[in-house]
Amino acid sequence: MLTQDNNTTRPDISHLRIAPQDKEERPIGRWLFIIAVIAVLTVAAGVFFYFFRERAVIITVATAEQIISGQEHTILNASGYVTPRRRATIASKITGQIMEMLAEEGIHVQKDDVLARLDDANSKAVMKTLEAEVGAAEAAIAEISVNLKNMEKNLARNRSLYKTGVITVKELDDSKTLFDGTGARLELAHKQIDVSRARLLEMKQELDNYTIRAPFAGIVVSKDAQVGEIVSPISAGGGYTRTGIATIVDMESLEIEVDINESFIAKVKTGQKVTATLDAYPEWPIPARVRTVIPTADRQKATVKVRISFDALDPKILPDMGVKVSFMEETAVPETSANRVRVPLESIRQDKDKTVTFIFRNGYIESRSITTGPSNGKFIEILAGIMPGEQVVVGDTVNLHDGQKARLATNK
């Protein structure tokens, strides 16, 4: 039906409608529901995998070392201390008050370096007096020398006059006596100036004693006096006088001193190889050798003192450090034991009636039954069950099991 408005014909569409049953249902809500379910399941699976999967345990490993012919074995263990062969507490040769202290703990000093200076004001004053005495003696010698030359001329003149009868014998003898006396005075003056010079030299030496120097190169390990204190080469009563300035250690002379029970001293000989381990660095084996066996025993402790020299010194080695030493002996190993190895003692574990260790291979732990041999307290010999070069787990192995995933402690 057409209607006309302002002479314009328009179609009438008001009667056009879509029946409700003809409308299509839209699937948007259903798809949103499916996506939400998938997301929840994915998150749940991730959480389950994160919390319930087996995590890699962090471990520390050591490599099994093959025992070859001529392997060194420990035959004796002992403990002792690092001691220097050259260690000195520096003292003053004279009694005096410290005016300047240059020594401090930890500083390196060379031979003849100044450690301290004492008050030398009085000695300097005495030295100036002696220098003046020497100067006066030199002037007196010059005066006497001039007089002696003049008297020598007079004596020669009087001898000529005596020959011509102008003067008497007495006048000639008087001039000769005066000449001889002046010569004696000159000789005495020379002796006196020698004494004055000797006293001056002695005072210079004494003045040098007011400067305390290092007797050898080393490190100051102890500062024993302060500025203002009195020091003396001898001990004084009351405790107000110091007998030492500082203590110096020659770090190039460090060695190990141990006491060996006299029952085992036969196992120790000069030049024998030793492995030393400082208590401060237990994982650092230090090669050393026996320097000397002191040829006397301590009857109170029934021990013999042994001194051991380091093959190479290191700044980490300090005096009075505790040290454990293992005396080594080279022994031949039978050819049939080519596959014998040694591992750290801490890698071994007793499991009921079996001795086991854990091998780390390709990211997993493998439990291995083994047969063990002798031990030196740090390493144990494996007779069967481990091949050279295999990595054994060391440390706490209580919670480990066969097939467990693992990674090295150094791996991030």
Image: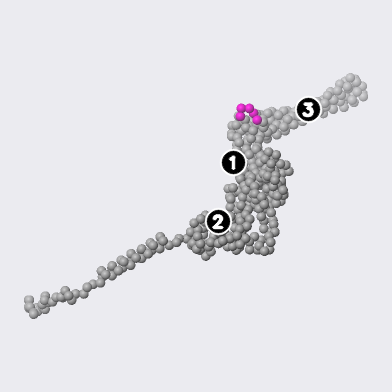
Q: Which residue is mark 3?
A: 189
Magenta stretch bounds? 235-239
Q: Eyeballing the image, is 368 above or below 211?
A: below
Dot 3 and dot 2 residues touching (CB under 8 Å): no
Is 106 situated above or below 174? below
Q: Nearer the viewer, residue 29 or 339?
A: 339
Residue 349 on image: x %, y %: 55, 56
Camera-side mark, 2 or 1? 2
Say if mark 2 contacts mark 1, CB within 8 Å: no
Q: Which mark is residue 382?
A: none
Magenta-span inclusion, residue 238? yes
x and y percentages locating residue 74 in the rendered image: 66, 53
- Disc 1 to disc 3: CB gap under 8 Å: no
Q: Earlier in the sequence, mark 3 or mark 2?
A: 3
For mark 1, what is the residue? 105
Q: Amino acid at mark 3?
A: Ala
Q: CA distance from mark 1 to mark 3?
A: 53 Å
Task: Decide: few, some or many residues near mark 1? Use Cα within 10 Å; few <14, some 14-19, many ≥20.
Answer: some
The span from disc 2 to disc 1 (Cα, nearest Å) is 51 Å
What's the distance in space between the residues labelled 3 and 2, CA to CA?
Answer: 99 Å
Which residue occupies the foreground of this view, 408 or 255? 408
- Residue at left 88%, top 20%? 171
Q: Earlier in the sequence, mark 2 or mark 1?
A: 1
Q: Which residue is at 7% across, 78% downward?
A: 3
Q: Nearer the viewer, mark 3 or mark 2?
A: 2
| Front-most of residues 50 and 400 | 400
> Regarding mark 3 in the picture, which secondary structure is present there?
helix
